[in-house]
Image (cartoon, rainbow, N blue to C red):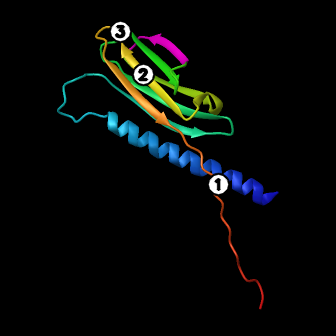
């Protein structure tokens, strides 16, 4: 029973590490150099961790003008899992999404409804089974 629990634990750790790495790569790809003047507002999506059934993401949006914006979370097929409009200059919210709903990919989209600027973050999840076998001589 302990071997099976350990395998499940390793599977979850490896999957979470891979998802965190992929999110880090996707988040860094969305960041603009300091001298870029395409947008005055920025957003980040960070992976906060997982439990047995869900993944947790933190979304931050610096909305300096306090414009109305839309936040949408959709799965790989484009099915909307969450959508809501917000206002305010500083937005930060955590989202707990069921692993079954993710289906390997999520898209976080933030659309400023005043200037129609859009920032999209793609999160890709994969699961891997890690099997660790150790053979050790104990006597002889």
Contact between marks 1 and 3 (CB within 8 A): the answer is no
* Inter-mark Cα distance, 1 to 3: 43 Å
Vertical placement of residue 28 versus 92, above or below: below
Vertical placement of residue 81 versus 20, above or below: above
Q: Where the N terminus falls, by quadrant?
A: bottom right
Helix or strand or loop: what does disc 2 sit on?
A: strand
Residue, disc 2: 109
Q: Where the C terminus falls, by quadrant?
A: bottom right
Contact between marks 2 and 3 (CB within 8 A): the answer is no
Q: Give residue 31's position: percent from left, percent from top.
A: 31, 34
Residue extending furthest toward the bottom: 140
Q: Give residue 99's position: percent from left, percent from top.
A: 63, 33
Q: Is residue 106 left or right of residue 121?
A: right
* Inter-mark Cα distance, 2 to 3: 12 Å
Residue, disc 1: 10
Q: Which mark is residue 113?
A: 3
Q: Is residue 107 left or right of residue 66?
A: right
Assess disc 3: are there few (<14), some (14-19) or many (≥20) residues with their C-alpha within 10 Å of its C-alpha: some
Q: Is residue 62 left or right of residue 53?
A: left
Report the residue at 58% width, 30% height from top. 102
Assess disc 2: are there few (<14), some (14-19) or many (≥20) residues with their C-alpha within 10 Å of its C-alpha: some
* Inter-mark Cα distance, 2 to 1: 32 Å
| Mark 2 / mark 1, whichever is N-terminal | 1
Contact between marks 2 and 1 (CB within 8 A): the answer is no
Vertical placement of residue 24 versus 79, above or below: below
Report the residue at 30% width, 16% height from top. 117
| Mark 1 / mark 3, whichever is N-terminal | 1
């Amino acid at each position: 029973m302990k071997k099976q629990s350990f395998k499940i634990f390793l599977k979850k750790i490896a999957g979470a590490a891979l998802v965190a790495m992929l999110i880090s790569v996707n988040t860094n790809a969305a960041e603009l150099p300091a001298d870029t003047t395409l947008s005055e507002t920025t957003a980040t999506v960070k992976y906060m961790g997982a439990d047995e059934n869900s993944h947790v993401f933190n979304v931050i949006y610096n909305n300096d003008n306090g414009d109305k914006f839309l936040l949408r979370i959709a799965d790989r097929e484009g099915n909307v899992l969450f959508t809501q409009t917000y206002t305010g200059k500083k937005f930060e919210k955590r989202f707990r999404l069921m692993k079954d709903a993710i289906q390997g990919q999520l898209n976080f989209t933030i659309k400023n409804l005043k200037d129609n600027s859009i920032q999209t973050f793609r999160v890709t999840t994969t699961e891997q089974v890690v099997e660790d076998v150790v053979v050790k001589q104990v006597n002889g």
